[in-house]
Image: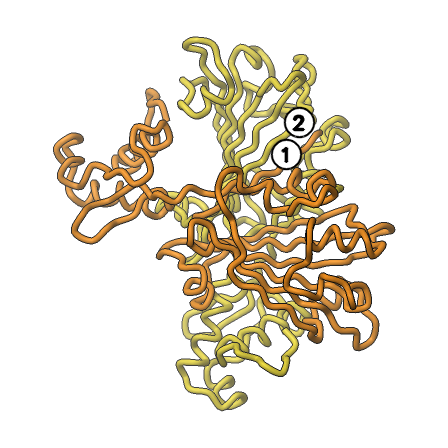
Chain colours: A orange, B yellow
């Protein structure tokens, strides 16, 4: 931030801000070593604790990471931009492309774990999908990996009465994925709701996503609706927050 | 989650899940005392550490909080639902209502701090707003409070060349707020982009938002565009993640 007449930011924050700007402008690229505590002390005339706090800010923000004995480096993992709205538009899945290909641009997001099963519906899923008495759901659990690092878990729930016998119950749902198959079954998704929360990961989540200390998860719960507001899928996603920027573009 | 044949969840997680369901179903309401460690030990036949972990899960998720010597209680602060898209539709601000009133339903979200100033633009703002050489920005810093708890900071940047002399440079922007004024000035916002990230708060942010331990912040950066893609406002928001659910509703 450009300094102003009454800059009340504490010193460590000002140093962190200037380092952040240098990272954002590309002066320090992914994997580059940042100035160390001694460099910051010499350059800014601050105490060691202040220099440490400044670097701590960037680590807390997921911009930098310590490597033992070597210093503090710009995180080389670039966040993935997830475009919520274009990603789900019919042009994407209508033409047989995976909805995920909109996200990844030149990088390769792959599913490294898939499990599909028929289960009793969790209560909150039962309530939203408006299932018949005792009706089960098809549950699709997937883990997504980018540059060999797990970045997201997704668990989809679909009414068995809708998807039974289709490729949705197989590991490979075929071209265009689940939404193309739902369309063929007469339940084309026409409306989506995404609800977003953030919290600290559970121990399990941290382990399974390989999340660094001080990094939250973002939870996205997406509900897909077919004609007449019929809910046909709930997809609960758990994202490593340091790996993602979510984007929503919309008209007034 | 309804239990299935192969429930591999660890015990503490199963206990946490059942307590979460009881909270979500309303069995335990806001402010209610949850079963304590001794209750969970007696009921589930688990070790104290397991009972403690189960309650820890709910605290990490922001659903429960400890009160010294009294036990663990359902957090009485209900998250605010922020509807990203409807909230910004012209019907809202076009008719003189604050864009915020869509959020709050029956609860009262108020601005308890406002500061307006003319400043040099931070570099990332300069780049996005496409300012003229040396052009300054009008900076509006606000803090929003719900039920007397601070829940969000927002800092808006608008080109001085666009807003000079208007109520946007005053603390009170008048009916319909900044967007209604921009429309009067010939820069009606017609398109929005919201970018969302999450990270741990800085010390300052935690203090100023009164954030409990183990709670991240959600960052929303909104850019408002007038006709021909002219960016007219950047609004950087910092939200207490335990206080918010963000919702985006959109058609395929």
- Where is A13 relative to B69, above or below? above
Task: Write the residue at 66% across / 44% down.
Answer: A97
Q: Of helix, strand and loop, which one carries label 1?
A: strand
Residue A183, above or below B110: below
Label 1 belongs to which residue?
A249
**Image mark count:** 2
Tell me the crowding category of disc 2: few under 14, some 14 to 19, or many 20 or more residues within 10 angstroms, Cα based. many
Image coordinates of residue B182 in percent, x first then y, are: 64, 18
Q: Is residue B226 above or below residue A73?
A: above
Describe the element under mark 2 as helix, strand or loop: strand
Residue at coordinates 35% horizontally, 23% vertically from top-left?
A2
Q: Quadrant of the N terminus of chain B?
A: bottom right
Assess whether mark 2 and mark 1 are in contact (beta carbons under 8 angstroms). yes
Q: Residue at point 33% right, 23% down?
A: A3
Residue A211 location (% of width, % of height): 40, 57
Residue A221: mark = none
| Residue B165 in the image, given as x and y percentages of width and height | 57, 11
Q: Which residue is mark 2?
A: B191
């Amino acid at each position: 931030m450009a300094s102003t007449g009454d800059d009340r930011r504490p010193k460590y924050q000002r140093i962190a801000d200037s380092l952040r700007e240098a990272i954002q402008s590309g002066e320090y690229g992914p994997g580059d070593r940042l100035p160390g505590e001694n460099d910051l002390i010499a350059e800014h005339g601050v105490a060691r604790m202040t220099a440490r706090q400044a670097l701590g800010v960037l680590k807390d923000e997921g911009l930098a990471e310590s490597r033992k004995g070597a210093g503090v480096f710009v995180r080389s993992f670039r966040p993935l931009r997830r475009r919520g709205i274009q990603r789900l538009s019919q042009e994407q899945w209508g033409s047989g492309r995976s909805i995920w290909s909109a996200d990844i641009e030149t990088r390769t997001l792959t599913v490294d774990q898939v499990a599909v099963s028929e289960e009793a519906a969790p209560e909150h899923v039962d309530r939203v999908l408006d299932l018949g008495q005792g009706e089960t759901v098809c549950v699709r659990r997937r883990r997504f990996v980018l540059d060999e690092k797990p970045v997201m878990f997704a668990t989809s729930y679909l009414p068995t009465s809708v998807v039974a016998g289709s490729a949705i119950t197989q590991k490979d749902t075929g071209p265009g994925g689940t939404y193309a198959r739902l369309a063929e079954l007469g339940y084309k998704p026409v409306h989506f709701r995404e609800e977003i929360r953030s919290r600290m990961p559970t121990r399990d989540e941290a382990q399974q996503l390989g999340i660094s200390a001080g990094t939250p998860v973002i939870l996205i719960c997406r509900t897909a609706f077919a004609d007449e507001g019929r809910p046909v899928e709930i997809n609960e996603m758990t994202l490593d927050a340091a790996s993602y920027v979510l984007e929503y573009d919309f008209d007034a």
